[in-house]
Amino acid sequence: MKEFKRIGVLTSGGDAPGMNAAVRAVVRTALSHGVEVVGIYRGYSGLIDSDVKPLVLRDVSNIINKGGTILYSDRCPKFKTPEGMAEAVTTCRDIGIDGIVCVGGDGTFRGATDLTAHGVPCIGIPATIDNDISSTDNTIGFDTAMNTIIDLVDKLRDTCESHARCNVVEVMGRGAGDIALHTGIASGATATVIPELPFDEESVINSMIEARKIGKRNFIVIVSEGVGGEFGPAFAKKIENRTGIETKFARLAHVVRGGNPSLKDRVLASTMGAVAVEELLKGKSNLVMCEKKGKIVSVDINYALILDRMYKGKLKDGDLDAFTEDEIASMKAEIREKQASMARLYGISKTINL
Ligand code: ADP
Ligand code: F6P
């Protein structure tokens, strides 16, 4: 089995609260096994530019509670080119990096699988507020971002109640409605609009008119950015015109990507960081850490990436060729389960939230 002397850790793509807790766990777990760690700064950009620094025990002190990422992050198009990959591999050879833990989203995992194929074993840790990695029930940062959102929406609700207004609130999530769906339920939103399920504007407007007649003063509508940036402001105007209820629009944007990670994200990040290193040192690679029904499990990155494509309806010709019938059946079952759980939550939110 490969003898590990030194591993690298990087954070890449959109930052997420809890990335630091993952980095800390990676460093301390590796050191406990007598393996050195180098921090790679600015994601794959730092690997190409050799922007690296050894990390010792105390370098990761006082970061478990901090948002952002001490290693910084970047989107690095050059890494997708053969030249960028060659420079990254050269850095690993020059510095003696025997494996890398890559913390980020699906783009980061595509990079990790490419690097593994070029002889640098990688393991991915899913960190993105969007929760759009289908192979894991939760990504690092999702819980914190949602807690920040409900805190902000609670404040909007206060002022809506005082002034008998409506507030349409757009939340991040890229193409995924997970953040909107959960925060819609948790903030008692009148309506939630997500890309995954149809939305009946007329029925919401009519319900608002009826609810106002019987004394409801505040209305919150949560809109996922995945339905398109024009939808929220336009729907706010429509509500005002049709119901006569004064309606404001708020786009929470990046504010929900910062801040101290929640307890749940700290535990998830710490556990995934520790298990990722244990797996790497056992000689495993091309895996992504996933939380499934409360347990941390390792999933093949290619399986995770293709599962995502299947879920998003973006499968390309030949994508399934490398998988067995059982694996394809298990992908389809996972997707059905996720869709059913979203539909169920959506149904509950419609029943209990006006
Ligand atoms: P996230 O990891 O949050 O999905 P990105 O999609 O921006 O964020 O991906 C992060 C980085 O991963 C990119 O900037 C790029 O360096 C690398 N990456 C993304 N897609 C690929 C790909 N298809 N092949 C190789 N590397 C990729
Ligand atoms: O993936 C995290 C995320 O914050 C998405 O919710 C959002 O669509 C995107 O990143 C914003 O990207 P950027 O930080 O490049 O503006």
Image (cartoon, rainbow, N blue to C red):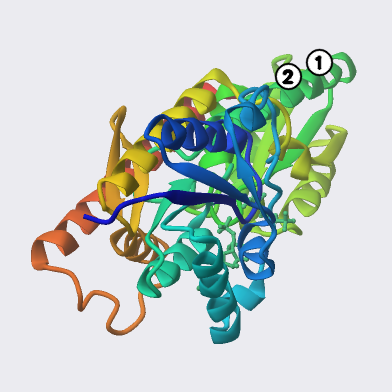
Residue name at image x 61 percent, y 35 percent: 20
Instruction: Please identify the quarter of the rendering in which residue 343 is found.
Output: top left
- The residue carrying mark 1 is 158
Q: Position of residue 130 (x, y in %)?
A: 56, 46
Disc 2 marks a residue whose amino acid type is Asp
Q: Is residue 329 left or right of residue 8?
A: left
The N terminus, quarter of image: bottom left
From the viewer's side, name the closer residue of 2 and 319: 2
Q: Position of residue 342 (x, y in %)?
A: 40, 41
From the viewer's side, name the closer residue of 191 and 316: 316
Residue name at image x 55 percent, y 68 percent: 94
Which class describes the residues within 10 Å of circle 2: few (<14), some (14-19), or many (20+)? some
| Residues at discs 2 and 1 in contact (Cβ within 8 Å) | yes
Q: Position of residue 158 (x, y in %)?
A: 81, 15
Dot 1 lies on which element? Answer: helix
From the viewer's side, name the closer residue of 259 and 95: 95
- The residue carrying mark 2 is 154
Disc 1 marks a residue whose amino acid type is Asp
The C terminus, quarter of image: top right
Residue name at image x 57 percent, y 23 percent: 186
Q: Position of residue 315 (x, y in %)?
A: 36, 74
Above/below status of 295 relative to 312: above
